[in-house]
Amino acid sequence: MAKQDKENKGVSIAMREAIAYADGAVVSKTLLDKKAGTLTLFSFDVDQGLSEHTAPYDATVQIIDGEAEITINGEKQTVHEGELIIMPANIPHELRAAKRFKMLLIMIREKVTK
């Protein structure tokens, strides 16, 4: 079992405080890492993001502070604190920070077959 798995099991996690912002950077912190999937906290400073990419499985993003500009298949939307969005498998998506934001990325590794 990975160290972060042991540290995070059975205890309450204050997600906003569990990760800090860094000037001009994206910061990530893995909370749980299993074959079946991961839970990862991210913080994005202004003008930071993740460039367009696809994944072979759905990815869920829950905004825990601020708001994110998330583009899925060319359609941009703003996702606010307390909201979540599911980015479908095999569809291009990207994330940008017009303002600082923090998010929890939930990845469940089940390949989608066509």
Image (cartoon, rainbow, N blue to C red):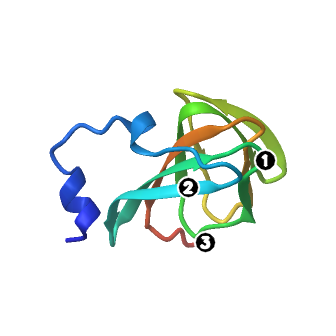
Q: Amino acid at mark 2?
A: Val
Q: Up-down: is 70 above or below 59? A: above
Left or right placement of residue 47 versus residue 29 in this view: right
Residue 54 location (% of width, % of height): 68, 66
Pick whichever of labels 1 and 2 is earlier in the sequence: 2
Mark-to-mark CA distance, 2 and 3: 34 Å
Q: Which quarter of the picture shows residue 61? A: top right
Mark-to-mark CA distance, 1 and 2: 13 Å
Which residue is rendered at x = 55% and y = 55% of the image? 27
Q: Which quarter of the picture shows residue 56? A: bottom right
Q: Which residue is mark 3?
A: 114
Name the secondary structure under disc 1. Answer: loop
Pick whichever of labels 2 and 3 is earlier in the sequence: 2
Q: Amino acid at mark 3?
A: Lys
Residue 96 location (% of width, % of height): 74, 47
Q: Amino acid at mark 1?
A: Asp
Mark-to-mark CA distance, 3 and 1: 36 Å
Residue 63 location (% of width, % of height): 55, 36
Left or right placement of residue 108 versus residue 72 in this view: left
Q: Are discs 2 and 3 less than 8 Å apart at CB?
A: no
Front label number (2 vs 3): 2
Tag on residue 27?
Answer: 2
Quarter holding the N terminus is: bottom left
